[in-house]
Image: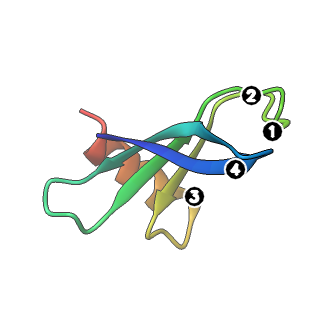
Amino acid sequence: MGTLAYTTIVDGEITLEMLGAILLSDDFDSFIITLPENQELEISMEKRISAPASSYEEAKTIEENTIR
């Protein structure tokens, strides 16, 4: 598990923006990105991105196999 973040520079100040977390499968062939609720980014509830998946069912399988 790792942190998903990026940096910005505003008025010469470096700011670290935390977006969420990234979870990798044991063999690194799939991953999940979680984005918690965030008013500034207009995320009203936690979102998850599972990849690679071509359907909702595949995404749920990746999630079940990665988050244990």
Tag 2 residue: 38
Q: What amino acid type is highlighted by mark number 4?
A: Ile
Q: What amino acid type is highlighted by mark number 2?
A: Asn
First in sequence: mark 4 vs mark 3:
4
State if disc 3 and disc 4 touch (CB < 8 Å): no
Q: How far across and how far down the image is residue 31, in percent?
A: 36, 57
Nearest to viewer (mark 4 / mark 3): 4
Distance between the Cα atoms at labels 4 and 3? 37 Å
Nearest to viewer (mark 3 / mark 1): 1
Q: Pointer 2: residues within 10 angstroms few (<14), some, or many (20+)?
A: few
Q: Nearer the viewer, residue 67 or 35?
A: 35
Tag 3 residue: 56
State if disc 1 and disc 2 touch (CB < 8 Å): yes
Image quadrant in which you'd find residue 56: bottom right
Residue 13 image label: none
Distance between the Cα atoms at labels 2 and 1? 5 Å
Residue 9 image label: 4
Q: What amino acid type is highlighted by mark number 3?
A: Tyr
Task: Indicate the quadrant containing the N terminus: top left, top right, bottom left or bottom right.
Answer: top left
Residue 41 image label: 1
First in sequence: mark 2 vs mark 3:
2
Q: Secondary structure at mark 4?
A: strand
Q: How far across and how far down the image is residue 46, in percent?
A: 64, 30
Q: Is residue 49 above or below residue 68?
A: below
Distance between the Cα atoms at labels 3 and 1? 24 Å
Residue found at x 59% / y 49%: 7
Q: What amino acid type is highlighted by mark number 1?
A: Leu
Q: Pointer 4: residues within 10 angstroms few (<14), some, or many (20+)?
A: few
Distance between the Cα atoms at labels 2 and 3? 24 Å
